[in-house]
Image (cartoon, rainbow, N blue to C red):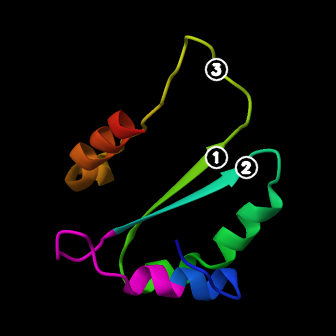
């Protein structure tokens, strides 16, 4: 958990953290509530920081409502995602 005075400084700190296995991080996952889209604006305003270090970016829109027994994750892979397709599928499985 990071404690920081601003959203931007939290992102900067997260980018500088080392990974558990000693390798470099290359992905940053953002989450926002679909019922509070104002928080998404903070994320969008700070995407430039993440792009500077060439991280992959995942933005997850979550909702508080339950899905019952039908739970789906849609993964959209285009021809430009060839190198990351396996990672995208694995991430969908983990979520």
Residue 67, relative to residue 9: is it above or below?
above
Residue at 22% x, 44% y is 86
Give the distance between the C-alpha atoms of the residues marked 2 and 1, in whole angstroms.
6 Å
State the separation of the CA atoms marked 3 and 2: 15 Å
| Residue 55: % across, % down | 37, 73
Residue 94 is left or right of residue 73, and the answer is left
Sequence-wise first label, 3 or 2 = 2
Q: Are marks 2 and 1 in contact (CB under 8 Å)?
A: yes
Q: Earlier in the sequence, mark 3 or mark 1?
A: 1
Residue 59 in the figure: left or right of residue 62: left
Please give the name of the residue rendered at 65% of the width and 42% of the height, measured from the top-left corner.
62
Which residue lies under the disc numbered 1?
61
Q: Look at mark 2 in the image and give the residue it sits on.
A: 33
Q: Residues within 10 Å of mark 3 (few under 14, many from 20)?
A: few
Q: Is residue 64 magenta?
A: no
Label 3 – label 1 distance at C-alpha: 14 Å
Q: Where 7 sits versus 94, above or below?
A: below
- Secondary structure mostly seen in magenta is loop
The segment highlighted magenta reads 12-26
Query: Percent from the top left, x then y, of residue 56?
Result: 38, 65
Q: What residue is shown with label 3?
A: 67
Q: In the displayed image of the protein, which residue is found farthest to the left?
A: 22
Residue 84 location (% of width, % of height): 26, 53
Q: SS of the residue at dot 2?
A: strand
The 10 Å Cα crowd at callout 2, few under 14, some 14 to 19, many 20 or more, is: some
Tell me: residue 52, above or below residue 93: below
Quarter of the image for residue 6 reads bottom right
Rendered-image quadrant of the C terminus = top left
Q: Residues within 10 Å of mark 1 (few under 14, many from 20)?
A: few
Disc 1 element? strand
Q: Residue at x 43, y 86 (%)?
A: 52
Q: Which mark is residue 42?
A: none
């Amino acid at each position: 958990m990071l404690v920081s005075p601003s959203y931007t400084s939290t992102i900067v700190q997260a980018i500088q953290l080392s990974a558990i296995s000693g390798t470099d991080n290359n992905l940053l996952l953002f989450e926002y509530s679909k019922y509070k889209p104002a928080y998404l604006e903070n994320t969008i305003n700070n995407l430039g920081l993440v792009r500077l270090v060439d991280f992959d970016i995942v933005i997850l829109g979550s909702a508080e409502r339950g899905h019952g027994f039908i739970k789906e994750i849609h993964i959209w892979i285009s021809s430009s995602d060839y190198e990351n397709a396996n990672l995208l599928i694995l991430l969908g499985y983990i979520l």
